[in-house]
Amino acid sequence: MPHSHDETPTSASASAAASASDMTAAAPSLVQPLPRETLEAQYGVEAARLLLERSWLEDPAFERLAFLRRQGIEPYPLVQGVQYPLTALRALETMEQQPVMVAGRLIRLELGDTSGRLLLTDSSDTLWLKLHPSLLAALDKEEPVGEEARVLPHLSPGDVVACSVLGRWPDVAIVSAMLLAPNLKPLPVDKRPGGGATLETLVWRASVLRELRRWFDGHRFVEVETPILAQHSGLEPHLDPFEARFRPSPAHAGKPVWLLTSPEYALKRTLVHGLERVFQLSRVFRNGEVGAFHNPEFTMLEWYRAYSDYRTIMEDCEGLIITLAERLGMGKRLTWQGYKVDLTPPWPRMTVCEAFREYAGIALEEAPDIERLRAAAEKAGIRLPAGIDWEEGYFRILIERVEPALGFGRPVFLTDYPAPFAALARVRPEPFPVAERFELYIAGVELGNAYSELNDPQKQAERFKEEQWQRARLGAPVFEPDPDYLRALSQGLPPTGGIAVGVDRLVMLLLDLPDIRHALGFPFPMAE
Amino acid sequence: MIDTSEFRKGLKVLIEGQPYNIVDFQFVKPGKGSAFTRTTFKNLLNGRVIEMSPRSGEKFAPANVEQVQMQYLYYDGEFYTFMNTETFDQLQMTEDQVGDAKDFLMENLVADVMLFNDRPIAVELPNFVELVITYCEPGVKGDTATGAQKQATLSTGATINVPLFIEQGEKIRIDTRTRSYLERVKK
């Protein structure tokens, strides 16, 4: 057989004690801990506690390993020679003379006196394979059972198994069986490796990422990778970046580094130096955000176009999302949680003021302070809590009346935000100043946030100062603004449109998943 | 104090001095905006449900609510008297406090009494109870397929719909959550 064991299988008479003593010879620290006091003095109390903790070494599930070794079966052999997926057995012609090795997970096992068969599955197929008469004969023999059959009586469903198979489909039979990795603990049947997305979703998600890159490549965007572990964080008052420590060195003495909430500063710096279309797919981090639409670590897609503005970005959104839907075989529509959305462009554009009037019955431009906003809200049947400021009043009306109504039937761009919510967008000085910013909504889900990027370094410096004060008033830590970004703006950022899109939410919408945790392979655990 | 990030279903908090149960909650955060926790609270005193969106990080006092297994003893025309099955302490509840549970309260039934600051506020019945029918029209044999029903009066005085074949004096099993007949209990 074309395989080899990493150690000679211990003979059937070898005892568990013998193999245990092999282990201790290799790793004396497993059995000869120093006294706790010595360890605590040397490594500290917590390290000593961890060094002496043994519960996971003594897992009762390991007993099966000792049992198998007593039977002369090495449970984790080194194997070469699994050349074919299971489904190849249906077509291979060479195995009439020469057995081929296949492998997979054992689903069922039937072992009788005169016949026997295994149900095996791998990613290609699920097959019943019967045992060759020679194998049954080997089993029948007096001890010791030959190596090719030895493991059969000790297999359990869930084990990962290799088989050498001889014959011609459908008349094929196993001539030798071997254990590759025993299943010691039950495997959940739902195939969610990290308690989040199913295997099927993970495969679809990979298609979404591939098609995304293809679209950007086709539109001559350059994929850029900028740091997520960065020297300076954004200052958005309501975002909380994760703080990390670089190992102390003279250059970093006392200064934290940050896991970024968005890679936008570095991306825009590439435009200052001459790239004109860039995109980045990266993990970003936001502390404290966990829920049906939030995971503290998520995948962000950002793209920027020089010599352009937020209007072009809207067209990009339409083109990109329709292309994705079509490539996934959905045509120009998607259905999310029962809501049908027609993706045919152009998608409606609606200003924030229009949306407040339409869905909340409030004329935002006539309510520029909290007293008037409260009165208008009261008239519209929304009670704003006492003691809040205008901004919070705005957000409460937005989340209670406006957002839940957006993007049903067709996607919608919510555009032209009141100046206080300009963030990094340019402001148009109309009677009621608005920022050239939009958010894209599909079926009530906010998918992305875009700007005509603010490229005036002086105004940007003022915004940073305002944000520092806002952070202080909210009790959030106050940071130094990124000097490299300010310098880059001073060197001249062309007029630019840019957007950040939550890829996990996009996957939710495209694959009709109810919760962001179903779109992520390994979601952040949430309190039960 | 309980932060919104510690919210979970079934958690009991105080709002304006009254105990509320958290029925449902969701983290919401408009783009570039502050975070809220959209929450459905149920008032444990009057059963009213309210929706509120506290700011994330807002703190609530825990409501001192506990459930104690108690045996129902008797009704004296004004109060329902229960006894703690461990300490044998007794307490009295008004009709308002007992609420709809009174329809299925029979003597010696063991139920969960909810206490708020050590005062009873509600009774939670077992999911299934067995009660005797004190009055109904005579039974009709056959015809069990159509699901036709008639009214029957229980020993507690409450009325419930039962199948036509049920006779006066029979004991039946009832699902207290749906207030519906389940099956005949054989003697």
Image (tube, coloured by chain):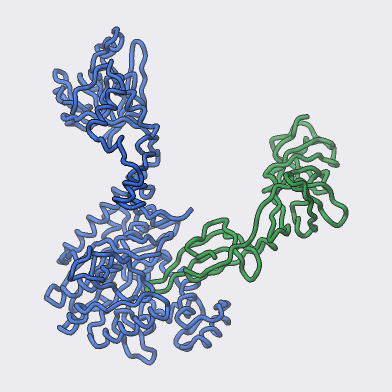
- Give the green chain's letter: B
Residue B51 versus residue A87 in the image, above or below: below
Residue B125 location in percent, x, y? 70, 48
- Count every numbered label the image shows and give the total: 0
Residue A292 location in percent, x, y? 43, 59
**Is B111 positioned to the left or the right of B138 in the image?**
left
Displayed quadrant of residue A408:
bottom left
**Is A44 positioned to the left or the right of B165 in the image?**
left
Residue at (58, 77) in percent of width and height: A381
Point out the image quarter for the N terminus of chain A. top left
Nearest to the observer: residue B55 or residue A166 = B55
Q: Is residue A308 visible?
A: no
Q: Is residue B65 visible?
A: yes
Residue A231 versus residue A201 in the image, above or below: below
Residue at (80, 57) in percent of width and height: B95
Nearest to the observer: residue A208 or residue A187 = A187
Chain A rendered in what hue? blue
Displayed quadrant of residue A435:
bottom left
